[in-house]
Amino acid sequence: MLNKYARAFFTRVLTPFAAFLLRRGVSPDAVTLIGTAGVMAGALVFFPRGEFFWGTIVITLFVFSDLVDGNMARQAGISSRWGAFLDSTLDRVADGAIFGGFALWYAGKGDDNILCAVAIFCLASGQVVSYTKARGESIGLPVAVNGLVERAERLVISLVAAGLAGLHTFGVPGVEVLLPIALWIVAVGSAVTLGQRVVTVRREAAEADAATAGGGGAAS
């Protein structure tokens, strides 16, 4: 949902920066790798210690690399299957680090096994949501569905809530409840999205099989 509008907006905003990096000889793959490393550092260094505000700031600085690298590749005319594969793979790594950081906090000083489990569910369901689309497309299906909570929504909901919850360390009262609420929203939304994609793939597979069978019968 957010992907459709936010990606187009930020792509336009970040185009001059992408052009600047190209002029400096920076490759799109280097931006992908640096961005992923920055997100992982922000999530796994700050979140397990409960420093959600600063962790979110660091992650936000690097998360836009996901838009910059593709922009650079298009400007340079070097878009490739390898670049798309690397970008998608490292997106999963970055997402795992973010929700893994939340889980480590709740497993440690956060001391809440239920929220630890919810964070782990967010991590796992996010990976499976991405896998269902990739697997469906790999067997020739369009997987034509916009899920309720896709990657952009998962990141925006969880990171905005984490950043605001981190203001608790600066004396802002009551904001610490925002992260648990966000994790529950992401968990439920991811489950719904997974169901949407599974149902869509099942329907598209049945239609494709029926078309194949019908074509075979007509040929005979």
Image (cartoon, rainbow, N blue to C red):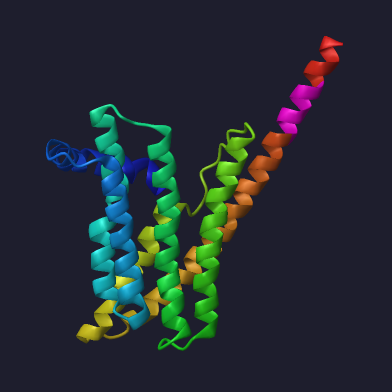
Count of all numbered marks drawn on residues in the image? 0
Residue 189 horizontal side relative to residue 139, left or right: left
Which range of residues does the magenta coloring cover?
206-213
Residue 103, position as x, y percentages in the image:
46, 76
Q: Is residue 60 visible?
A: yes
Q: In the image as oriented, which residue stretches furthest toward the top?
A: 219
Q: Quadrant of the C terminus?
A: top right
Residue 26, position as x, y percentages in the image:
19, 42
Residue 89, position as x, y percentages in the image:
45, 49
Residue 49 falls inside the magenta stretch: no
Residue 203, position as x, y percentages in the image:
70, 38
Please give the name of the residue rendered at 44% of the width and 78% of the height, measured from the top-left corner. 104
Quarter holding residue 46: bottom left
Question: On screen, 187 above or below 73?
Answer: below
Please give the name of the residue rendered at 27% of the width and 54% of the height, measured from the top-left corner. 34
Question: On screen, 78 above or below 201?
Answer: above
Please give the name of the residue rendered at 39% of the width and 66% of the height, measured from the top-left corner. 158
Residue 147 horizontal side relative to residue 153, left or right: right
Q: Is residue 172 visible?
A: no
Magenta stretch secondary structure, dominant: helix
Please give the name of the residue rendered at 61% of the width and 49% of the height, measured from the top-left corner. 196
User: 7 or 46, which lies in front?
Assistant: 46
User: 189 or 50, which lies in front?
Assistant: 50
Residue 36 horizontal side relative to residue 134, left or right: left
Residue 121 horizontal side relative to residue 181, left or right: right
